[in-house]
Image (cartoon, rainbow, N blue to C red):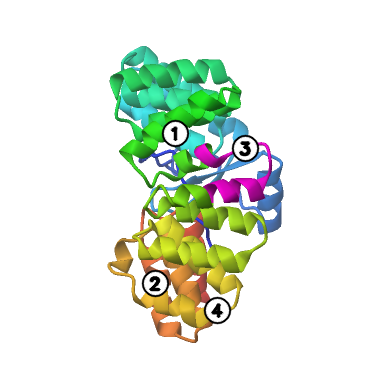
Amino acid sequence: MTHDHDHSDGHEHDHDLDPDDPAWEVKELEEEEVKRLLEEGKLVQVEGPDGQPLFIETEAFVEGVRLDLAENADNAPYLVGVGGLLLEGEHHDLAHAAVELALAADPASADALLLAGIVEARLGQLDTALERLDAHLVQAPTSVLGQTHRAHVLLGLGRAEEGHAAARRALALDPNDVGAIQALVAGDDGTAAALDRTKALAAELKGWGVLRVAGDLAVSLGDDTAAIAYWKQAVDLGADDSTIANLLAQLGQAGRIDELADIADGLSRLSDRDPSLRWNVAAGYEAAGRAAEARIVFASIAHDPTSAPDLRAEAQARLSAE
């Protein structure tokens, strides 16, 4: 199994649920039943206090979240953190409720305004999203995320020239911002044309971000060899863990295990890297017959509270199976 790590919205938070709370009824379910209920939207997966995955009936989850939001209605930073968590879990209505409470508590909060713009865009309310993002940029004029999300909203509204201008403002602040590059090369003429625009942009932007986007587009076109080449160039220029994880995943799928292992061996401070990147390193070592090293990396994931619950569980399962 390999894990790709996508560009995120930049919100981090700590928000665990207590399984000993009498409000939560504990039931034993078979794995297939859990999968079915998750697919049907009747269960929600959350992280327990020790990082273990827990499954809660959706109605109880919604009720518990709304109660928690009400109890913290005057704590804007907390509400923004919880709202980001809910957005990651694609609980858009609950995320909207959280950010509206945050704005009621602190109408000038730059973080709340940014999250509000992102949530409104996810809900398809593009005009309102633009208003929130504009207000965010008044408070935080050098916000890369604000400019990037504004660019995508403007593109969604059919205002391409303004959207491209916003993307360029983001890139002036961070030339490797993947979201801004994606906005700048987007079009309604297909992926191949977007890749052509990305390659042209690479002559202008001398960072790794444009090569990351080129690799992503090449994968969409089914050209895995080109994607690997683009991502390797990006890594040579100091690409982020997400890009390295994608490269390792693609090398693994292509059976180029020796190359995968060589890149993994060259990574510094592996224990501090993104858990999805570490997973691909461990999977590569495993495929290369380096079981002891794979176990060390899987263990680093299994015992890392910052790892996603499902990833921690999978890493622990790998360790228990041997």
Query: Is 193 colored magenta in this rendering?
Result: yes
Is the residue marked by circle 4 packed among few (<14), some (14-19), or many (20+) residues within 10 Å? some
Identity of the amino acid at label 2? Val
Q: Earlier in the sequence, mark 2 or mark 1?
A: 1
Is the residue marked by circle 3 packed among few (<14), some (14-19), or many (20+) residues within 10 Å? some
Disc 1 to disc 4, C-alpha distance: 36 Å
Are discs 3 and 4 less than 8 Å apart at CB?
A: no
Using the rendered image of the protein, determine whether residue 180 is visible from the camera's viewpoint: yes
Q: Earlier in the sequence, mark 1 or mark 4?
A: 1
Give the residue at x 51% y 49%. Answer: 200
Identity of the amino acid at label 3? Gly
Query: Is 223 colored magenta in this rendering?
Result: no
For disc 2, the marked residue is: 297
Mark 1: secondary structure:
helix
Residue 251's quadrant in the figure?
bottom right
Disc 2 to disc 1, C-alpha distance: 38 Å
Which-is-in-front pick, marks 2 and 3? 3
Question: Is residue 247 placed above or below 148 in the rendered structure?
Answer: below
For disc 1, the marked residue is: 167
Is the residue marked by circle 2 packed among few (<14), some (14-19), or many (20+) residues within 10 Å? many
Is the residue marked by circle 1 packed among few (<14), some (14-19), or many (20+) residues within 10 Å? many
Q: Earlier in the sequence, mark 4 or mark 2?
A: 4
Q: Earlier in the sequence, mark 2 or mark 3?
A: 3
What's drawn in magenta, residue-wise?
184-198
Q: Is residue 132 left or right of residue 32?
A: left
Identity of the amino acid at label 1? Ala
Mark 2: secondary structure:
helix
Q: Earlier in the sequence, mark 1 or mark 3?
A: 1
Numbered label attached to residue 51: none
Numbered label attached to residue 187: 3
Disc 1 to disc 3, C-alpha distance: 14 Å
